[in-house]
Image: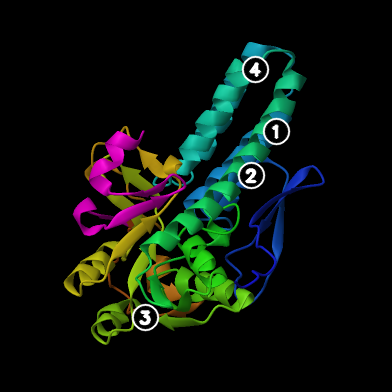
């Protein structure tokens, strides 16, 4: 058994404010941003300083507390009204990530059900935000360990992943990379293949960075190389994260996940989703109801200040796609590995 290195925490409550790893600057610069206001947290989520559905949920929990702290009233009803407005502002930042709305709803419910003074409610909200963070960390470690059961029956395996579903995308440890970490700890992992994940390159920048920090062998490939790698027998299984899962198992994840699942099926490579149970949105019957965020076209048109395309070209930049449940071998949660068609029975 290997010893894992020091964990990476993208969201930290420290000295009465939030410290975020600025993921837009990785891997070239490991820097942090201090967040003291709810508006600043909303901006950090929108600009992807913090990203990944579980991490966004943790950040939103703290964002709700920061907003509550800014409310200057002792009147309970007035406080709750203003807190609703803060919840709406935070909820408009990333429409696809269900953990965002789950965390906001939990914080609102906590405020509504709390008794005592407004000051006491604020204190309870901070403790709830801390609890959301710790619960997600525990959840990811459980997901990683449950993921060991899907590894093929061989001494060591190779795992292909897409985007970043690691410590940076969660409270720590990761979902898809949580499976990777647990496999590495148990000496059952040979190598990770990381899709670069255009257009923001989260795989090349963030997943590869996390693996390098931990000493996990990682090979970065372009998004168009996965079929070739599978045909050559380089990939044993695919494990990806999720931003929202419908009740039937259809899963929204970073754009390019759907095509990767089709390629995996064509090559008889098992395709798994790793995500907290809170990512399942039982209010949505299937993936057609999942809202898909569209981001600024500059993400496609240029890298940094370098233009990639001719003037006059048009662009389409959906940030996510939906993988149908019938392409997914199983959903790895903290409760275990669940077949997509059995999700409704696992509430």
Q: Which residue matches tag 1?
A: 127
- Badge 3 marks a residue whose secondary structure is loop
- Does residue 1 appear anywhere in the picture? yes
What is the x, y in percent for residue 195? 39, 75
- Badge 1 marks a residue whose secondary structure is helix
What is the x, y in percent for residue 124? 70, 26
Question: Magenta stretch containing residue 1, yes or no?
Answer: no
Q: Earlier in the sequence, mark 2 or mark 1?
A: 1
Q: Which residue matches tag 2?
A: 134
Rounded to the nearest angstrom, the CA distance separating label 2 from label 3 is 34 Å
- Badge 2 marks a residue whose secondary structure is helix
Who's the residue at 65% across and 62% down the image?
8
Rounded to the nearest angstrom, the CA distance separating label 4 from label 1 is 12 Å
Rounded to the nearest angstrom, the CA distance separating label 2 from label 1 is 11 Å
Who's the residue at 31% across and 32% down the image?
283
Q: Which residue matches tag 3?
A: 222
Q: Which residues are magenta?
A: 321-347
- Badge 4 marks a residue whose secondary structure is loop
């Amino acid at each position: 058994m290997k010893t894992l290195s020091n964990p990476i925490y993208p969201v930290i409550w420290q000295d009465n404010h939030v410290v975020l790893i600025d993921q837009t600057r990785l891997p070239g610069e490991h820097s942090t941003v201090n967040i003291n206001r709810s508006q600043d947290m909303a901006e950090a989520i929108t600009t992807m300083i913090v990203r990944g559905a579980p991490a966004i949920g943790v950040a939103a929990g703290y964002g709700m507390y920061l907003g509550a702290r800014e409310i200057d009233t002792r009147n309970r009803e007035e406080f709750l009204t203003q807190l609703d407005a803060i919840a709406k502002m935070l909820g408009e930042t990333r429409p696809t990530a269900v953990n965002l709305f789950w965390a906001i709803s939990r914080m609102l419910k906590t405020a509504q059900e709390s008794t005592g003074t407004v000051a006491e409610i604020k204190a309870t909200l901070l403790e709830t935000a801390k609890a959301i963070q710790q619960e997600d960390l525990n959840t990811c470690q459980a997901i990683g360990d449950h993921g060991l059961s899907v590894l093929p029956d061989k001494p060591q395996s190779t795992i292909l992943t897409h985007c970043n579903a690691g410590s940076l995308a969660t409270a720590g440890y990761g979902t898809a990379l949580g499976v990777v970490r647990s496999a590495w700890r148990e000496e059952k992992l040979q190598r990770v293949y990381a899709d670069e994940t255009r257009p923001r390159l989260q795989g090349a920048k963030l997943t590869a960075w996390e693996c390098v920090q931990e000493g996990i062998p990682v090979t970065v490939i372009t998004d168009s190389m996965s079929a070739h790698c599978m045909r050559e027998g380089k990939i044993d299984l695919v494990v990806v994260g999720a931003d929202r899962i419908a009740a039937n198992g259809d899963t929204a994840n970073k754009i390019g996940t759907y095509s990767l699942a089709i390629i995996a099926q064509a090559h008889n490579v098992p395709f798994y989703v790793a995500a907290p149970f809170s990512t399942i949105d039982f209010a949505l019957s299937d993936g057609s109801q999942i809202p898909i965020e569209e981001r600024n076209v500059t993400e496609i048109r240029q890298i940094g200040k370098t233009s990639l395309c001719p003037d006059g070209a048009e662009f389409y930049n959906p940030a996510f796609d939906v993988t149908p449940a019938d392409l997914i071998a199983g959903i790895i949660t903290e409760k275990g590995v669940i077949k997509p068609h059995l999700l409704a029975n696992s509430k």
